[in-house]
């Protein structure tokens, strides 16, 4: 027992000394200084929301094709005796112009033979009429009133009349064949291809080449059902004098230069494409080689063009960058006074690369829409809003500073008001 007591006394003394030292250190520890400013939030870029009217602009692509294009083919057979110098690839032709002429000697002889047949039929008919008149007089002199038709030579007269009609038909057919030795252009246009030449023998229906009209060209533009609604066109649209189609601006490269032509939509195709689920609207351009050309550059068939069509208009909407719209119907705004993120639901009307148009009672023109990506965002999140100016500089919107001195008065009488741009940094 005598040995344990000194050890216990020593331990108690050590504990007392340690506890006293810890108490002294706690009492002498300096008090922490209170921060004069709130912690700086995450820096994000923003752009202003503006009041803007929405005009739908539909863009599509298509190939120019002639409205009328045919294969040139003869209706009779024969050897080619003449080929028009304009009937060549790329040649310009006029309506009624002779493109190909076949040898016509055989067909001229056919006309002569047919004319001879007509003369013979006329002579026979005249003879039968005379004989019918003699037969009628003979029957009257004999007092026969109800003589048979054969005795009056009526069947013979009808046969002679039919023979004359047949001869006239054969003459008309021979004359028609003679006129068909000349293959003429049915419209004014251009020659796409020629497949025959002088001296070649052709048969009915054989292709001589292909031509197309130059009065109107058209472009099939595939668009979606939503775009059709934005144009304000029904599924079965056909232009009338009272209901004109919307104007179309065509753009394409010709001779290394960007060209522009203006046409209009005249109709829609008869059905929706079952594979793409798109519907074609057909746009036309009148006189592409004349008045419709762009400084002499025609919108020629085969050219690939981009078409832009102005559709419906919606006034009084708000527009923000498309990147500011999250989850389809939410917009992120920067509250520069509080330095916080605000999330609002909106009624999104339309979105494209140029921006997003929407309606909202909680958003006003001039609000700053956040376009920077945010991880795990929430309403009230601390942020610092940066706004890029047209000259390339970056303006920082700082939140309102709320520091007070010990007496409760503001410690900085020159503090900047809410939303004021505090710094300007040149951007790249």
Image: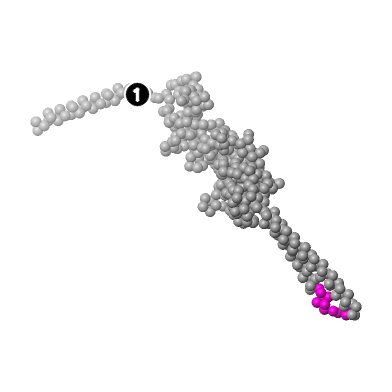
Q: Answer with left or right where residue 326 lies relative to residue 196.
A: left
The N terminus, quarter of image = top left
SS of the residue under disc 1: loop
Q: Answer with left or right where residue 287 lies relative to residue 389.
A: right
In the image, residue 129 above or below residue 229: below
Instruction: Indicate whether residue 71 is drawn in magenta.
Output: no
User: Is most of the magenta stretch helix, strand or loop?
Assistant: loop
- Measuring from the top left, give residue 245's x and y in whole percent: 65, 45
Q: Identify the residue shown where x is 12% and y is 28%.
A: 6
Single out the residue that lies furthest toward the left. 2
- Measuring from the top left, give residue 342's x and y in whole percent: 49, 35
Pick the residue in front: 202 or 245: 202
Question: How many numbered marks have been drawn onto this rendered protein structure?
Answer: 1
The residue that mark 1 highlights is 31
Pick the residue in front: 381 or 421: 421
Residue 32 visible (yes or no): yes
The span shown in magenta is 144-154
Pick the residue in front: 95 or 235: 95
């Amino acid at each position: 027992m005598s040995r344990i007591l000194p050890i216990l006394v020593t331990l108690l003394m050590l504990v007392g000394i340690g506890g006293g030292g810890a108490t002294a250190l706690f009492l002498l520890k300096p008090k922490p200084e209170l921060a004069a400013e709130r912690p700086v939030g995450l820096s994000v870029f923003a752009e202003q929301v503006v009041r803007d009217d929405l005009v739908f602009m539909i863009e599509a692509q298509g190939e120019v094709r002639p409205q009328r294009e045919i294969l040139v083919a003869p209706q009779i057979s024969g050897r080619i005796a003449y080929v028009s110098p304009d009937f060549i690839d790329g040649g310009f032709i006029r309506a009624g112009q002779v493109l190909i002429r076949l040898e016509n000697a055989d067909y001229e002889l056919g006309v002569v033979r047919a004319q001879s047949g007509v003369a013979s039929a006329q002579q026979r008919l005249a003879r039968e009429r005379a004989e019918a008149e003699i037969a009628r007089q003979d029957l009257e002199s004999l007092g026969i009133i109800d003589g048979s038709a054969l005795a009056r030579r009526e069947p013979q007269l009808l046969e002679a009349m039919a023979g004359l009609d047949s001869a006239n038909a054969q003459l008309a057919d021979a004359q028609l064949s003679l006129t068909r030795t000349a293959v003429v252009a049915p419209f004014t246009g251009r020659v796409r291809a020629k497949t025959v030449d002088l001296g070649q023998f052709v048969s009915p229906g054989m292709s001589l080449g292909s031509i197309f009209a130059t009065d109107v060209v058209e472009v099939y533009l595939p668009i979606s059902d939503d775009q059709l609604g934005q144009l304000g066109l029904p599924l079965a649209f056909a232009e009338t004098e009272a209901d004109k189609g919307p104007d179309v601006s065509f753009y394409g490269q010709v001779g290394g230069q960007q060209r522009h032509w203006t046409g209009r939509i005249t109709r829609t195709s008869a059905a929706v494409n079952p594979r793409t689920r798109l519907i074609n609207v057909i746009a036309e351009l009148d006189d592409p080689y004349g008045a419709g050309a762009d400084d002499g550059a025609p919108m020629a068939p085969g050219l690939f063009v981009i078409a832009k069509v102005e559709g419906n208009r919606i006034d009084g909407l708000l527009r923000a960058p498309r990147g500011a719209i999250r989850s389809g119907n939410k917009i992120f705004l920067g509250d520069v006074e509080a330095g916080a993120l605000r999330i609002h639901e909106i009624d999104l009307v339309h979105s494209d690369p140029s921006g997003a148009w929407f309606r909202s009672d909680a958003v006003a023109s001039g609000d700053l829409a956040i376009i920077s990506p945010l991880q795990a965002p929430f309403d009230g999140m601390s942020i610092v809003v940066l706004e890029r100016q047209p000259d390339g500089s970056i303006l920082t919107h700082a939140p309102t500073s709320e520091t007070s001195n010990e007496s409760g008065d503001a410690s900085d009488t020159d503090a900047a008001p809410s939303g004021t741009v505090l710094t300007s940094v040149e951007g790249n």
